[in-house]
Image (tube, helix red, strand yellow):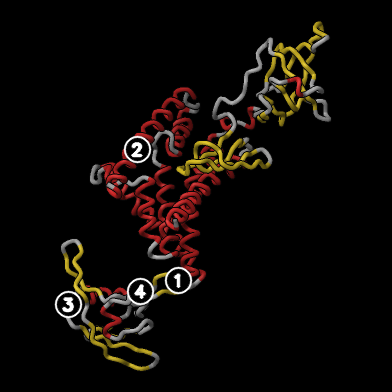
């Protein structure tokens, strides 16, 4: 159960901050954001604040921000439609009732002659009981359309995604992956502040309970002067000498509380990638510094970004196969293993997953953020956008292929871990 909770919290947090990036920059650009959702499928929780409905959905496998103009969302008011109108204090239409008009006794019923709910914001028609006079009504920019009792806010063109500049749209889409990288930086900084960060000082860190260092009498905090007579100036020197002497007695000269001690240690033999190295069961020392923690957050994020990009490159060039990929099941199983090592390892794992999510979303694959950014770049070069229907078809095909890939990867994970 603890693994399930850890998985849901981590995955939920990664999706939340990713979608939060989209939401913040879309709102800054003036785009009407109808829904901020974590998960897909049926709603299990919803809360509306201002113009946006915040929802949690049943399947915790992603999320989305529904921006005005991205999907067909409004009924077209065609000539001959009979609708009810309610007005605000400025005599502008603030509600257009499409059906069940009997539930709104104060509504003015008209037969539509013409309407524009995107650009000029007007509706023109004949009022019931006065069919010979054609009247024109102004629509409030924040008016809602009511169908089956459900209100949907109108989206004038200047509130729609497509109306914004290439730069504004690019920021709104890029902000999702950007937030994943920022989240990783913050998590690494928190780890460094509270747990500490690796230091290169020639000092012994925490000792493992079954290691050769503890058995030989070494202690955490011992300052290493020499090993086998070789002067030690850094933690890297200690690691190098230990690894070069598997199974051999080596003598440590250490300082412990002002006393100099000579302690012989025999590194255990460990075979890694066909090569025998020595291990004594001791971690590097850690240090805590607010300034260094800040730098550490950026350095760790940069290092992991390079590692993941290199792995993606190997996948593209065929050096890795599809079996190297992990879906939700594989991530869950890895989370279970990491959780056994403790809270801080789980935090580090969350940061790495966040970087992974950011990088994968920036790949120029249709239906992903990177695919949309690719179309924006093409628009900037051409000076005009790609036909929306053609772009939508490309994204649909890309989404279908991604779902197929997800099924294959998930099936591989199930076979690997459970069959």
Closer to the camera in the image, 410 or 290: 410
Mark 3 or 4 closer to N-term?
3
Identify which residue is drawn at 45% across, 71% down. Answer: 196
Q: Secondary structure at mark 2?
A: helix
Q: CA distance from mark 3 to mark 1?
A: 31 Å
What residue is pinned by disc 2?
407
Q: Secondary structure at mark 4?
A: loop
Which residue carries the number 4 mark?
284
Looking at marks 1 and 2 on the same chain, the residue that comes earlier in the sequence is marked by 1
Q: Disc 1 marks which residue?
A: 196
Q: Which of pointers 2 and 4 indicates the residue nearer the eye?
A: 2
Q: Quadrant of residue 307?
A: bottom left
Quadrant of the snapshot with the N terminus: bottom left
Left or right of 141? Residue 379 is left
**Residue placed under numbered mark 3 in the picture:** 247
**Viewer-proximal residue among 334 and 401:** 334
In the picture, measured across the screen, residue 252 lies left or right of residue 337, that is left
Choose the circle earlier in sequence order: 2 or 4: 4
Q: Position of residue 299 (x, y in %)?
A: 42, 61
Foreground disc of the pair 3, 4: 3
The secondary element bearing badge 3 is classed as loop
């Amino acid at each position: 159960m603890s693994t399930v909770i850890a998985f849901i919290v981590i995955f939920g947090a990664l999706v939340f901050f990713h979608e939060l990036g989209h939401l913040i920059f879309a709102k800054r650009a003036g785009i009407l954001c109808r829904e901020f959702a974590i998960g897909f499928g049926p709603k299990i929780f919803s809360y509306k604040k201002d113009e946006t409905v915040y929802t949690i959905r049943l399947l915790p496998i992603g999320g989305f921000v529904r921006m005005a103009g991205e999907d067909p969302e409004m009924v077209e008011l065609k000539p001959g439609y009979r609708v009810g109108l309610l007005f605000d204090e400025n005599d502008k239409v603030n509600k257009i009732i499409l059906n069940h008009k009997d539930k709104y006794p104060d509504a003015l019923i008209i037969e539509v002659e013409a309407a524009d709910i995107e650009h000029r914001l007007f509706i023109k028609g004949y009022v019931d009981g006065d069919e010979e006079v054609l009247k024109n009504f102004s629509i409030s920019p924040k008016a809602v359309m009511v169908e089956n009792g459900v209100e949907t806010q109108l989206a004038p063109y200047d509130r729609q995604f497509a109306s914004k500049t290439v730069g504004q749209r690019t920021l709104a889409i890029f902000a999702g992956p950007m937030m994943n990288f920022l989240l990783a930086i913050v998590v690494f900084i928190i780890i460094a502040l509270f747990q500490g960060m690796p230091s290169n000082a020639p000092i012994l860190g925490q000792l493992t309970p079954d290691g050769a260092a503890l058995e030989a009498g070494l202690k955490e905090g011992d300052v290493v002067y020499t090993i086998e007579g070789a002067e030690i100036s850094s933690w890297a020197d200690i690691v190098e000498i230990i690894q070069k002497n598997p199974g051999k007695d080596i003598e440590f000269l250490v300082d412990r509380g002002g006393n100099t001690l000579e302690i012989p240690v025999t590194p255990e033999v460990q075979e890694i990638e066909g090569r025998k190295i020595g291990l004594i069961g001791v971690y590097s020392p850690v240090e805590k510094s607010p300034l260094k923690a800040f730098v550490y957050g950026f350095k760790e994020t940069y290092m992991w970004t390079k590692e993941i990009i290199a792995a993606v490159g190997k996948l593209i060039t065929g050096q890795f196969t599809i079996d190297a990929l992990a879906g939700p099941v594989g991530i869950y199983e890895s989370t279970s293993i990491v959780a056994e090592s403790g809270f801080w390892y789980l935090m580090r794992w969350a940061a790495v997953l966040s970087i992974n999510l950011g990088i994968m979303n920036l790949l120029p694959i249709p239906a992903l953020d990177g695919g949309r950014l690719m179309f924006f770049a093409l628009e900037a070069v051409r000076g005009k956008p790609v036909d929306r229907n053609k772009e939508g078809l490309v994204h649909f095909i890309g989404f279908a292929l991604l779902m197929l890939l997800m099924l294959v990867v998930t099936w591989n994970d199930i076979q690997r871990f459970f069959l």
